[in-house]
Image (spheres, rainbow, N blue to C red):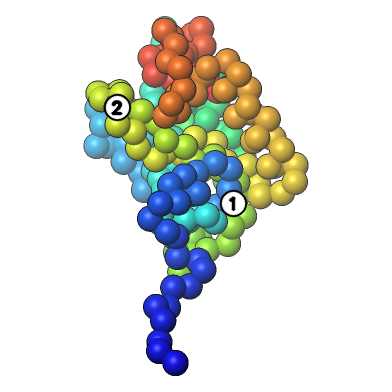
């Protein structure tokens, strides 16, 4: 009896395409604060995720600029909502003070990436899939004929309630054409009133 090629069932076939897309359980394996690399960003947090349906990681980015009052203090805006949804999901109590500087619960200035790393204790080797995310192909703004894998910047707990919440939210975005996916019909303006260009107010 001759030997046959050994191919474990968990190794994807080249033609399987989008099997790694859609809703799936995930784990945060690395946190990187890239804010200082971008002059326009008040926050640019990159979270590397291990995905249940893929052997390759994906990046979720929480980024943008704060809306500000005439005196320069920050106010309710898309970026602030994104940050606190993320922070609440992972149980992190720190956040921006009224000037936009990142502080801990007592008001002490912090290195955000270091504090999140200590709080989350990510495990790249044996990640626990305790969160839920949505992965999709987003058309490139420079060349709509190409697309790249992206994670919508919102995660929920990997529980029945958390999964239902995220699935309902993404369905709402799709129904309003507020999320751009490969193959979807483009809209003239994908932003909600009051949102900055390229962002929704969620």
Residue plotted at (58% across, 62% down): 128
First-in-chain label (1 vs 2): 1
- The quarter of the picture where the N terminus appears is bottom left
Check disc 1 and report the residue beneath it.
25
**Mark 1 falls on what kind of element?**
strand
Q: Secondary structure at mark 2?
A: loop
Q: Give the labeled residue for mark 2.
A: 145
Q: Residue at x 64, y 35 (%)?
A: 166
Q: Position of residue 80 (x, y in %)?
A: 51, 26
Camera-side residue: 64 or 106? 64
Tell whether 129 sits left or right of 189: right
| Vertical relation: 66 (above or below) 52 | above
Query: What's the residue at 52%, 30% (across, down)?
Result: 82
The percent coordinates of residue 175 (x first, y second) are 60, 18
Left or right of residue 142: residue 95: right
Q: Name above or below for residue 99 compared with residue 45.
A: above
Foreground residue among 125 and 40: 125
Q: State the quadrant of the C terminus.
A: top right
Furthest residue to the bottom? 1
In-front residue for pair 176/36: 176
Q: 10 Å neighbourhood of mark 1: few (<14), some, or many (≥20)?
A: many
């Amino acid at each position: 009896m001759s030997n046959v090629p050994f191919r474990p069932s968990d190794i994807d076939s080249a033609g399987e395409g989008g099997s790694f897309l859609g809703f799936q359980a995930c784990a945060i394996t690395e946190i990187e604060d890239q804010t200082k690399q971008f002059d326009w960003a008040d926050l640019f947090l990159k979270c590397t995720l291990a995905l249940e349906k893929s052997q390759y990681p994906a990046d979720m980015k929480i980024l943008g600029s704060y809306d500000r009052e005439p005196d320069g203090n920050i106010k309710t805006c898309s970026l602030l909502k994104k940050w606190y949804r993320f922070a609440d999901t992972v149980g992190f109590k720190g956040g921006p003070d009224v000037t936009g500087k990142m502080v801990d619960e007592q008001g002490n200035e912090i290195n955000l990436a270091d504090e999140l790393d200590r709080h989350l204790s990510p495990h790249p080797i044996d990640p626990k899939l305790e969160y839920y995310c949505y992965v999709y192909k987003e058309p490139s703004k420079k060349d709509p004929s190409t697309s790249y894998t992206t994670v919508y910047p919102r995660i929920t707990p990997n529980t029945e309630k958390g999964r239902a919440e995220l699935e309902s939210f993404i369905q709402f975005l799709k129904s309003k054409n507020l999320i751009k996916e490969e193959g979807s019909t483009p809209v003239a303006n994908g932003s909600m009133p009051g949102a900055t260009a390229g962002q929704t107010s969620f």
